[in-house]
Amino acid sequence: MARIAVIGAGMASMATAARLAVGGHQVVVHERSDTYGGGVGLLARDGFRFDTGPGVLLLPAVQRDLFVKTGKKALEDLVGLEQVDPAARHLLPGGVDVTLPNASRSGVVEALDAAFGKGSGDRWSQVMVRAREVWEATRRPLLEDVLHDPATLARDPYPAAARRGLFRRGGPPGLAGVAAGELGGGGLGTLLESWALAYGLDPRRAPASATVLPYVEQTFGVWYVRGGMRALADALYERCLERRVEFRFGTAVTGLLLDGGKAAGLELSGGDSTPADVVVAGAPLPALYRDGVLPPDAGGSGPGGEPGRCTVHLALRGARPAGTAHRTVVHAADRGAEAAWVFGPERRPLPGTGALTVTVLRPDDPAVRPDGHEAVTLTATVPCHDPNGTGRGLDWSAGGAAEAFAARMTEAAEAAVPGLRGRELWREVRTPADTARQTAAPGGSVPAPALAGASGTLLRPPNRPSLPGLYLVGGWAHPGGGLPHAGMSGAIVADLIAGGPGGSR
């Protein structure tokens, strides 16, 4: 069986390693930090526990399949998995307050009619019907299989709504066009575009296929792992150990060993090296771009440029009120100013509170806080870390920048958590600069999931690049960022290495 070297101990890397170890391969994971999980991190302090990455789980079937295929115990035997209901509360400009139930189409229709007027729910439902066509057209080629035909996926599969008048024909209108033309703009349009922003996509330029993002959430549900999402990373790490995967922490990979035009191992910091028959890169290794293994901006996956996340972890005195939503989105009053700040190319001063969308996570979980207290996490999509002033982001290490932005996030979040600042025991702030330092992600960017359309600019490099013996997994490779996509890329690559066609089915 093959000697396989895996770069990085993120979720995609561990998913690949576990599957390959089942096949009898000798798998060694090289991780530059002292822990596993990648972006699925943990902050523990004074009895509080905070997820430093995603706070909810989508498409848990991907994780279920991984654990079924790699061991005797199923996912639910190892972690407590429960649906989040309601899925989210949204506080929109003008005082609109709408709570969307989890995985209930009729419930969503009723909630939107009550918030925006009769007929609003039906307009939303019709958009979701068209988003279902996107899902059905792209699920296999974009998510479950290797990237066979990028040219086909460069076209937006969203079926444009029928139009009246002389100019009835036309291609998909883009997400902003769907929000304005099919939903009538306003709060309903804001709601649709907020999914793109949450994934780090510019709502002004995202393809109409981005409607699949709310479709997936509202169709398959939103889930939470008891004890926090880090418990999922813990379970996957233990599964890897059961399958005799070896982890070498504190091992920085600096490049590839090549032999006869084939990947033959890893170059390590300090001048060391390790041979391998196959290399799986689960991290955006700069050497792959520097040495021309990957093009410098393949599918947007070159170093830096994409937005990141700023999170504020708040330890609050006082218990979480009964009936509080797990997730509340406080929407920006000035969406145009927010989009210009996050995605604009110029150097960016910090925005005002009105140009800021903040997601507030308040899990009802005794495992994440001491009795009588509450653990709250605030998240915002922000420019990446750009300490050199190239115009691609913001210097988050500049004096006072992180603290000033955290104060504005906290002020905005008081709409969802009245009296928030008066309850604060302590806070910890994490910016893209911290993400870059902890995970080696370029600029602290958080990769978005791959989407069809946009002339292929939102696709990721294929899992099997041109260099023999090298495979790519994780958010910087097909099918892009997100926990479900990490599991899918692991399944695709494990199947390719085993001699299969590459697929996560």
Image (spheres, helix red, strand yellow):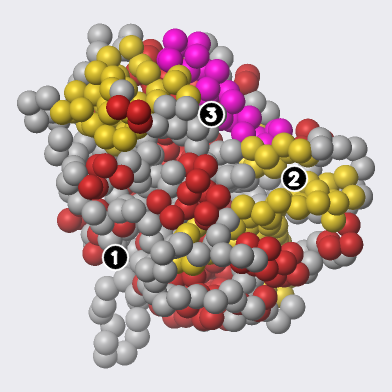
Q: Residue 491's spot in the image, x, y percent?
A: 35, 29
User: In the visual, does 44 lie left or right of 280?
Assistant: right
Q: Which residue is mark 3?
A: 34
| Mark 1 in CB contact with mark 2 (< 8 angstroms) | no
Quarter of the image for residue 53 reads: top right
Secondary-structure class at tag 3 = loop
Q: Check the image and report above or below for 14 versus 428.
A: above
Q: Going by the picture, which residue comes out furthest to the front?
A: 270
The answer to whether residue 235 is visible is yes
Within 10 Å of disc 2 (Cα), the crowding (few <14, some 14-19, many 20+) is many
Q: Residue at x 12, y 25 (%)?
A: 259
The residues bearing labels 1 and 2 have C-alpha atoms spaced at a distance of: 36 Å
Secondary-structure class at tag 2 = loop
Which badge, 2 or 3, is on the more N-terminal residue? 3
Q: Residue at x 31, y 57 (%)?
A: 300
Secondary-structure class at tag 1 = helix
Q: Going by the picture, which residue comes out furthest to the left?
A: 260
User: 144 or 480: which is nearer to us?
Assistant: 480
Q: Check the image and report above or below for 39 versus 331.
A: above
Could you tell me how many numbered marks the image carries? 3
Q: Residue 229's spot in the image, x, y percent?
A: 62, 37
The kind of residue on which mark 2 rests is Pro
User: In the visual, does 237 lie left or right of 442?
Assistant: right
Q: Residue at x 24, y 64 (%)?
A: 455
Q: Quadrant of the N terminus?
A: top left
Quarter of the image for residue 143 reads: top left
Q: Residue 170's spot in the image, x, y percent?
A: 26, 77
The kind of residue on which mark 3 rests is Asp
Q: Residue at x 15, y 28 (%)?
A: 258
